Image: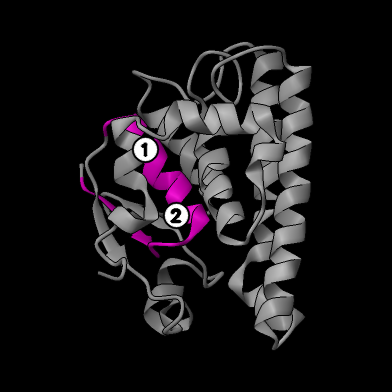
């Protein structure tokens, strides 16, 4: 099976998929798509991803887009270890954590949104900082509702962690004091030294600035 990930090193959506691939032990090739250089708008990339975004994941010649759909597909295809709980109610809770980030935070810090919001770098940063802090606050409250656990949901690594880790990285980049969210901070600290998480980090990617 040949798996190719089209991504950008600092894209949080790409980061999620790298974590999921690493957690499941799936070998893959990375092809960089330079967002700052506008490569996502090229005809070549839009053939893979009509939305003009990353990530796009190709498995044996078939291409899939949108990180939630990709991660759910990986969970269906590679079932030795799971990213979603088997119990329906727990599965819904993990999906809610996923969507808190996927729908409630990341789209608002997307490069296209930031550029549309303002030409001023400081105003863009403040916008992204606000929505990152707001989203992590919601995530924190949901974690509290779900009870104790080492990870984002309970004591097992899940899709919720795949989404939380990149968002914490982004929040820190935009100047959010993540320490104000103790449950989020604890879950992040639990995962940050896992080998598959470290190899998925933005700075570890082949297209990252050296």
- Residue 89 covered by magenta stretch: no
Total marks shown come to 2
* Front-lying residue, 81 or 178: 178
* Magenta-drawn stretch contains 7: yes
Return the disc, 1 or 2, that comes first in the chain's sequence.
2
In the rendered view of the protein, which quadrant contains the C terminus?
bottom left
Q: Residue 207 sits in which quadrant?
A: bottom left
* Residue located at (74% from left, 84% from top): 118
SS of the residue under disc 2: helix
- Residue 14 marker: 2
Instruction: In the rendered structure, find residue 88 and report the number of the disc placed on it.
Output: none
**Residue 95: horizontal and vertical position, in percent?**
66, 31
- Relative to residue 45, is residue 196 drawn left or right? left
Hey, which quadrant is residue 68 in on the image?
A: top right
From this view, report whether residue 107 is shown above or below residue 16.
below
**Which range of residues does the magenta coloring cover?**
2-25
- Is residue 65 visible to us here? no
Q: CA distance from mark 1 to mark 2?
A: 13 Å
Q: Eyeballing the image, is 209 above or below 121?
A: above
Label annotation for residue 197: 1
Disc number lying in front (1 or 2):
1
């Amino acid at each position: 099976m040949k798996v190719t990930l089209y991504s950008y090193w600092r894209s949080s959506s790409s980061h999620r998929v790298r974590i999921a691939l690493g957690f499941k032990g799936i070998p893959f090739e990375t092809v960089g798509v330079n967002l700052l250089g506008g490569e996502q708008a090229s005809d070549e990339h839009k053939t893979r991803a009509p939305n003009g975004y990353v990530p796009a994941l190709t498995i044996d010649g078939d291409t899939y887009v949108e990180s939630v759909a990709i991660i759910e597909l990986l969970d269906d295809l590679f079932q030795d270890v799971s990213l979603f709980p088997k119990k329906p109610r727990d599965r819904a809770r993990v999906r809610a954590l996923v969507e808190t980030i996927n729908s409630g935070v990341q789209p608002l810090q997307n490069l296209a949104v930031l550029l549309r919001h303002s030409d001023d770098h400081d105003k863009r940063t403040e916008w992204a900082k606000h929505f990152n802090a707001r989203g992590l606050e919601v995530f924190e409250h949901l974690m509290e509702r779900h009870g104790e656990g080492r990870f984002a949901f309970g004591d097992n690594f899940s899709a919720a962690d795949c989404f939380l880790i990149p968002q914490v990285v982004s929040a820190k980049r935009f100047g959010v004091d993540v320490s104000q969210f103790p449950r989020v901070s604890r879950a992040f600290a639990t995962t940050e030294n896992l080998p598959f998480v470290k190899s998925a980090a933005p700075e570890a990617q082949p297209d990252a600035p050296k």
